[in-house]
Amino acid sequence: MGDLALMFHVKDGGVSDPVKWSKENLQPDRSIIVLDESSGSLFLWHGQKQGLVQRRTALRQAQSLKGHGYTIGKSIIGRDTKDIIEIDSRKVGRVPEETESNNKLEELLSRKFREIGNHIVTFDLEGVGAPKAKPVPTEAKPTSTGPVSTVTTVKASTGPQVIKPKTVETPVTPVKVTPATKAIKPATEYEDSSEMKVSDGKSQEINISDARIGLLLVSILDKYDDIWISKKADGIYNVEMMDGPICSFKIVEKAIKFTQNSFSGISTNIKDQIKRKYTELAKLL
């Protein structure tokens, strides 16, 4: 049968429905998952109108598919998926990595294929034509106890069987935050002290670098209600909003150092307001 592929539309609430294999599914208000056995990759494509909540929900679905594959009957599609290639369509044409990944997805969707049922396609073109009918079990069981999709088949008198997955959300463990009971000793924005101490019955150490990162994020949230923060392997933090990147920075000798293109996508007025807010908050350290 050759390598198989599937396309999913991630709906609000985290339900991933298989859809017909087509470029037309790449719409601005959608997040689309493409599971491709031929490359061992899973593409996660976000339309321009997708917010942070929708993108994070789609990423959880993609991670679940990567870890467990997609079960149909006794078969598991994509069990050997090696990586997730996430594409933000807002960055295509501006960020080289995003553009390259999008080109790979476009190339995959342009390949000749044939559908073998249940929206499953193969790039093995031998025997093109009506596929032989195969019995579909009335019940499909996941091969893992993890958060894998539960698959239920719906019988029909004619035509291929339609499979609708129901996803089980991964529980989020709450994090308990204990507020300090004593004020932190004041420090200026540019002090190089590596740590300070507060007392709540026990001595606790607060890293000054982490405190400055927190104050910067609070300053940005004063202007934007919806931001997304990620940290790369090289220690660079990326901060984004709905309309694109805000800034990137890393800690160098306990100080925040911004990358060259930081704040270039926002107005100078907002940039100055963020800077003033951070300066005011840093006086509390």
Image (cartoon, rainbow, N blue to C red):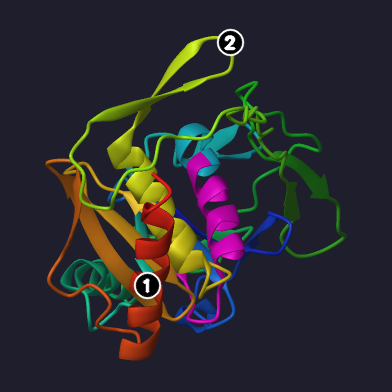
Horizontally, residue 212 falls left or right of residue 162, namely: left
Horizontally, residue 67 falls left or right of residue 17, namely: left
Residue type at mark 2? Answer: Gly
Residue 235 within the magenta-colored segment of the rendering: no
Residue tagged by mark 1? 276
Q: Nearer the viewer, residue 186 or 167?
A: 186
The reply to whether residue 67 is in sight is yes
User: Which residue is the extreme one toward the top?
Assistant: 202
Query: Above or below — where is 11 with respect to 207?
Result: below
Between the C-alphas of marks 2 and 1, the distance is: 35 Å
Residue at position x 45%, y 72% from top?
241
Residue at position x 64%, y 32% from top?
147
Mark 1: few, some, or many residues within 10 Å (few <14, many ≥20)? few
The prevailing secondary structure element of the residues shown in magenta is helix
Magenta stretch bounds: 45-63
Q: Nearer the viewer, residue 265 or 77?
A: 265
Q: Secondary structure at mark 1?
A: helix
Q: Position of residue 40 (x, y in %)?
A: 31, 45
Q: Position of residue 204 (x, y in %)?
A: 44, 18
Q: Earlier in the sequence, mark 2 or mark 1?
A: 2
Quarter of the image where one finds residue 144: top right
